[in-house]
Image (cartoon, helix red, strand yellow):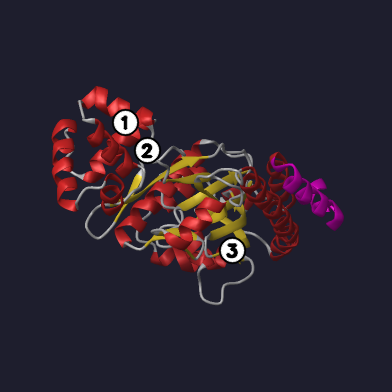
Amino acid sequence: MAAAARSDAQWSELFLSAALEPHLWDAAIRAMAQATGSRHGQMIGFGPGGAAFNWISDVDPAIIVASGAIDQAAPDLNYRIAADLMQDRAGIVHEAHYDVARRSLRSDDYLDLCADFDIFDGCQTRLHSDRGGMIGLALLRAAEDGRTTQEQRDLFGQIAGHARAAVRLQQAIEQQGFALLTGAFEAMDRACWLVDAAGRVGGMTPAAQALLSAGPLRLRDGWLACARAEDSRALMRAVRCVIDPPARAAEPVMLTDEEGGVTLLVEAYPLPARPWALPFAPRGIIVARTGAPTDHHAQTLIRTFRLTPAEADIAVRLAAGQSRQQVAAARGVTAETLKVQLRSIYGKTGCGREAQLVRLVGLIAQ
């Protein structure tokens, strides 16, 4: 077989070229499949929220749709994941490990998918792993291909070494995107964080760094988190919204204090996705709205809801992230007077609580 006769240097060139020109990954994993007598080659990435990407050579596109309906990262559904997590895991996991892992599945969903697309057998190895997830390389074999031989697994292991080097190279290249974007944001006075496909922060503006030091947000093992657990969960949902397909802007997250007052409004937006990108590139931008009230917002509230200028100013200040104490101090009123004014604002706008009012002003700003 011609592809199997490739030299080590040729395999190295093929995979390093894919790191430099990512659209070549398909050709690289296809060549790997052909060299090992396998129906398909696969490179797959898993993050905290499930499959981050799934590249399979010469495959019916329907398998991507079908596999997306299954939690592929669950070891009690996917015997390939279960085999990878076995104690004393081998460097190359193969059919003998799959046989053991299949005994403890709680559902036949993944087995049915493998039967439908004839991909029961094969072997796999890890190319990259950290707390945020894993990238794996695999052979998916049809019934007519048979189970892998030791010779085929040895060749797969040799090729995987070059794929691993290519992943490290592409990781270095993609992570440069954080430095470039962060440099472009240096002049911004907004607090912005850039996140990768796992949701981890890879870059931030000076205002964001300052907010981490003094505000309700913090970095916890690379992820944005809050003092209050419920706020952290809401923030993580927003981040997952912009990095998981189909990526879309998230609903604003309102961080609150112990009294339920809004202390900060956080918005999350996806960045344009690049084909054949690994999970290390910037995927989303998180923005904390802490700016001063604007005349435009106040005038809109006055016209639309017949708020008084004082009431409009209060609403915009709260939406801009000021606490009730800060608003009262800025306006020179007592906390009780502010409560009375808020009740009037709620009645005119139809809001039941401060979080709804902040969201309303945020919609006006969009």
Left or right: 258 as drawn, with respect to 60: left
Left or right: 214 as drawn, with respect to 185: left
Q: Could you say whether the residue bearing mark 2 is in a helix, strand or loop? A: loop
Point out residue 204 in the picture as x, y percentages from the top left corner.
56, 52
The vertical placement of 248 against 333, above or below, is above
Residue named by callout 3:
129
The vertical placement of 312 against 146, above or below, is above
Residue named by callout 1:
298
The vertical placement of 55 against 156, above or below, is above
Asked if the residue under mark 1 is in contact with the one under mark 2, i.e. CB atoms within 8 Å, the reply is: yes
Q: Hey, which residue is sitting farthest bottom in the picture?
A: 88
Residue named by callout 2:
293
- Residue type at tag 3: Ser
Mark closest to the chain's N terminus, 3 or 2? 3
Q: Dot 3, crowdedness within 10 Å: few (<14), some or many (≥20)?
A: few
Q: Quadrant of the C terminus?
A: top left
Q: Residue at x 65, y 52 (%)?
A: 175
Residue 92 colored magenta? no
Q: Residue at x 68, y 42 (%)?
A: 26
Q: Nearer the viewer, residue 331 or 181?
A: 331
Point out residue 52 in the picture as x, y percentages from the top left corner.
52, 49
Mark closest to the chain's N terminus, 2 or 1? 2
Q: Residue at x 61, y 59 (%)?
A: 123
Point out residue 179 in the picture as x, y percentages from the top left corner.
66, 50
The vertical placement of 316 against 280, above or below, is above
